[in-house]
Image (cartoon, grey):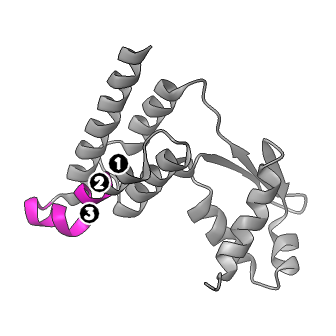
């Protein structure tokens, strides 16, 4: 059996609330105390596991009565989702954010796991560095091309 690390456990805990609700509000210190970890561990989980690429929006209010609010992003249809993803990619995208984006598409059943694996093989850092010096820019071009092609396919089906 695979042992889960603390970040995975905290992520699963927060996502359990989001299964039933559109958003969750937490106090970083309360969650850190509950899991007996430092508050920066909570920051790490939120900054890496609850990003727009993963389908979440995070709001925070600092100070004594501060909170962190995690909201699920729901879009009207797949075309809107693809448009938002195209905007997220921008002109440069890191390998990590590219992987997150593809994983979100697989999770939302916009593409199959096999299609996701094929796309990931094309945006792999080692592959792109062999082709050009600006691997993040090349990754962005490739991902936007994939996303736009999916968008056109969806529009044709409508």
- How far across and how far down the image is residue 43, in percent? 67, 69
- How far across and how far down the image is residue 98, in percent? 38, 55
What residue lies at 43% left-to-right and 53% top-to-bottom? Answer: 113
In the image, 134 versus 105, the foreground residue is: 105
Label disc, if present, on residue 27 of the rendered structure: none
Residue 74 is left or right of residue 87, and the answer is right
> Up-down: is 63 above or below 145?
below
Task: Give the magenta range.
Answer: 119-133
> Up-down: is 156 above or below 140?
above
Verify CB contact (< 8 Å) between mark 2 and mark 1: yes
Picture quadrant of residue 66: bottom right
Label disc, if present, on residue 115 of the rendered structure: 1
Task: Please state, as top left, top right, bottom left or bottom right, where the C terminus lies in the image.
Answer: top left
Is residue 130 rendered magenta in the image? yes
> Up-down: is 5 above or below 81?
below
- Looking at the rendered structure, the secondary structure element under dot 1 is helix
Residue reaching furthest to the left: 131
- Looking at the rendered structure, the secondary structure element under dot 2 is helix
Residue indicated by mark 3: 124
Residue indicated by mark 2: 118
């Amino acid at each position: 059996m695979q042992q889960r690390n603390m970040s995975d456990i905290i992520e699963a805990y927060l996502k359990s609330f989001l299964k039933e609700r559109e958003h969750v509000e937490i106090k970083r210190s309360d969650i850190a105390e509950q899991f007996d970890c430092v508050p920066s561990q909570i920051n790490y989980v939120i900054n890496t596991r609850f990003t727009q690429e993963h389908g979440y929006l995070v709001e925070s209010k600092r100070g004594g009565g501060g909170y962190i609010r995690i909201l699920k992003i729901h879009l009207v249809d797949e075309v809107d989702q693809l448009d938002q993803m195209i905007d997220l990619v921008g002109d440069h995208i890191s390998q990590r954010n590219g992987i997150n984006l593809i994983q979100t598409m697989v999770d939302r059943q916009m593409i199959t796991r096999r299609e996701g694996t094929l796309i990931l093989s094309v945006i792999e850092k080692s592959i792109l560095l062999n082709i050009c010096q600006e691997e993040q820019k090349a990754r962005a071009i490739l991902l936007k091309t994939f996303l736009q092609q999916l968008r056109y396919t969806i529009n044709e089906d409508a």
